[in-house]
Image: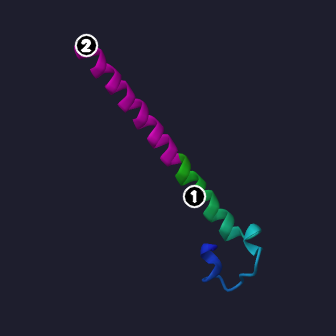
Amino acid sequence: MIPCQTTCPHYCPGCHKGCLDWQVRQSALREERRKKRAYLTYYNELCRTVTRQYRALSPLRPR
């Protein structure tokens, strides 16, 4: 269901594709997803680096 469907007085099926409010909302959601992806990428790489450093410092365990 489209979020604006219940609150928009001008709603009709398919109208969201040309609606300026909908496009602004989608643009904001895209930007939020981009920021989240950048955040996760940065911290994933940071954790990977720390893990690699700890493993390099730890003694090898016999199997």
Q: What residue type is labelled 1?
A: Leu
**Residue identifier under label 1:** 29
Residue 10 position (above or below residue 39):
below
* Magenta highlight: main SS: helix
Q: Residue 60 carries which label?
A: 2
Check disc 1: other Cα within 10 Å, few if <14, some if 14-19, many if 20+.
few
What whole-number distance in Å separates the C-alpha atoms at marks 2 and 1?
Answer: 46 Å
- The residue located at (47%, 37%) in the rendering is 41
User: What residue lies at 37% left-to-right and 25% top-to-bottom?
Assistant: 49
Residue at image coords 42%, 35% = 44
Residue 52, how many percent across, how many down? 35, 21
Q: Residue 7 appears at what percent x and percent y?
A: 60, 83
Q: Is residue 47 above or below residue 37?
A: above
Q: Give the range drawn in magenta.
A: 35-63
Q: Closer to us: mark 2 or mark 1?
A: 2
> Local crowd at mark 2 within 10 Å, few (<14), some, or many (≥20)?
few
Amino acid residing under circle 2: Leu
Nearest the viewer among 50 and 34 is: 50
Q: In the picture shown, does residue 34 fall above or below 5?
A: above
Query: Relative to residue 10, is residue 43 drawn left or right?
Result: left
As drawn, the residue found furthest toward the front would be: 63
Residue at the image position 44 percent from the left and 35 percent from the top: 42
Residue 57: say if magenta: yes
Q: Nearer the viewer, residue 25 or 63?
A: 63
Query: Residue 56's mark?
Result: none
Describe residue 62's horizontal placement relative to residue 18 as left or right. Answer: left
In the picture, measured across the screen, residue 60 lies left or right of residue 48, that is: left
Q: Is residue 27 magenta?
A: no
